[in-house]
Each structure stands twice: as C-alpha cells, then as structure tokens.
Image (cartoon, rainbow, N blue to C red):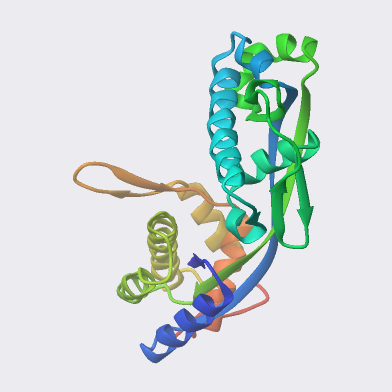
Amino acid sequence: MRIEVISKDAMNELSRVLSKAGIMNRTREELDWVAEHKISLRRKLKELKSIKIGAVKDRASELESTLRFLIEKLKDGEITLDDIGDDPELIEALESLERGGYLKVEDNSIRLQKDVDSVEDIEVEVLIPVEEVADYLEELESLGAKVITEVFFVKRYYVEVMEVELEAIQKALEIAEEYADEEDILESSIAGISKSLLSKVILELVKDIRRKNELVEMLMNMEPIELEGDKGSLRIYFEEDVLEEILKELQTLGYLKVKGNRIWFY
C-alpha cells in the first residue's frame, strides 16, 4: 500500500512514526508530470466580453476585476513583487499591464509608467481549460485562439507500507491521516484492503497448492475476487505480473518461500 504525502519532510517523518509503531515501510520519491490543455485567446477586454461564450466572458470579467484592483493599488504608490506573490490572478493582470507598457518594473518595485485611460482597452490573455469550451473550438479558432499545453514537472513523495495484515494496514492509515490528504488516504485504504484480501486468498491456497504455475492459474480463474459488504461489494482484478509481485512481497515478509516453480509455506 502506497501513501502519497506532500513533502519530503512529511515522507521521512511518517516513515519514522510507522517504524516506531512496528509497521514495516519504505520511502519512495518519483519525478512525475502533469499536462493541462488550455485555449489561449488574446484580445482587448471589451472584445473578449462581447464574445458570446460563457467561459470566455466569465474569465474576462474575472481579469477585469483583478486589473481594476491592481491599478488602484498602483495609483496609491509603487508596490513590490512580494505583494504580488504567487497569486496567478495578480500575475496575469501584472503581465497584461506590462505588455501594454503601463508599468515600470525595477528590481523588486512596480509602479505605473502611464495612466490607464480605459481598463477595457487593455489587451489580456484568457486561458481556459479545453474541456470547458469543447463545443466552441471552431469558433474560437476563427477568432485567433490557440491551444496551449502546459506541462508541470513535480516530485512526488510516497511511503510504502510493507504489510498485508489488515490490522497493520488500518493502523498505518490512522497514523497517516496527519500526513496525507483525505482523498489520498481513501485511495490508499482501498488499495491496502484489496491487497490484504488478495494476499490472504494466496496464503490460504498455498497451504494446499505448492506449485506456482498451478497457483497462478487458479487465481486467474477466480478473478475477480469479491468482498461482499452490507451496502456494496469490492471486486479485485489483477494480472499475472501482479501475482508475481505479491508473491515476492510475501516472501520478503517471511510468509512463504518461492524458488523456481516451488512454493514453501511457513
């Protein structure tokens, strides 16, 4: 069972706490990426607001409000890049004013370089997820819109719980609640319970079946393995390679020994 946490420090701390509780685990870091596809349309605010596509008009209105707020701040005096921070709305508004030549940015300070006669005449770029305007792609293309693909590289941090006993898995999940998001805990709990159930089925079968090929064949014929509940059921699907990996883990944990096609049950 793998639990994703938000940082390297959280990963190391969770690993230490689990180990202290007697739960076998290991840490894992991965480089991952996320791709987002967006429609980009750059026009004057008044032109964007006249386009009869809800998502475009809404985005233009949001940018207008942010621009008015930022301009009022700048009229009161210069501000700093620290004031902008990493707020995406303010960054987009700042970039729009800079492209129009309204700003002067020096070191960390930002100030108005010329008056803004009309906010609606400022050229801005709206970025809208493709799925929100899927029905209007041809119309937007005729207006000069482009598809922008944004790729974000991220590090992901995991703690893998090396246990198959349900009690140990539940204890690990309770501890992890302080280190992971609720959604990640839910996903991990489903995976952990499923793996525990599959492992339990394997260990029961190994008592009578000592040849790996026979064991794998029987398990594949049993797929899906189902756990019935009062209000629903859990169905577990798997491939042969998955069974091989679980057998390796069960051997590492000392439940059984696999050598060639032979299995010894401890």
**Residue at screen point 56% across, 21% down:** 55
Q: Nearer the viewer, residue 93 or 162?
A: 93
Going by the picture, which residue comes out furthest to the bottom?
20
Q: Percent x, y for residue 145?
A: 77, 20
Q: Percent x, y for residue 155?
A: 66, 65
Q: Percent x, y for residue 86?
A: 61, 55
**Residue at screen point 44% across, 76% down:** 163
Q: Nearer the viewer, residue 77 or 249?
A: 77
Q: Is residue 73 left or right of residue 181?
A: right
Q: Nearer the viewer, residue 82 or 207?
A: 82
Give the image quarter of residue 172. bottom left
Give the image quarter of residue 202. bottom left
Question: Which part of the image, by quadrant, shows the C terminus?
Answer: bottom left
Give the image quarter of residue 143. top right
Q: Is residue 117 left or right of residue 254?
A: right
Up-down relation of residue 208 to residue 56 (above or below):
below
Q: Is residue 206 left or right of residue 79?
A: left
Q: Percent x, y for residue 100?
A: 78, 33
Instruction: Answer yes or no: is residue 265 visible.
Output: no
**Residue at screen point 64% across, 53% down:** 78
Instruction: Answer yes or no: is residue 105 visible.
Output: yes
Q: Nearer the viewer, residue 72 or 51?
A: 72
Up-down relation of residue 160 to residue 70 (above or below):
below
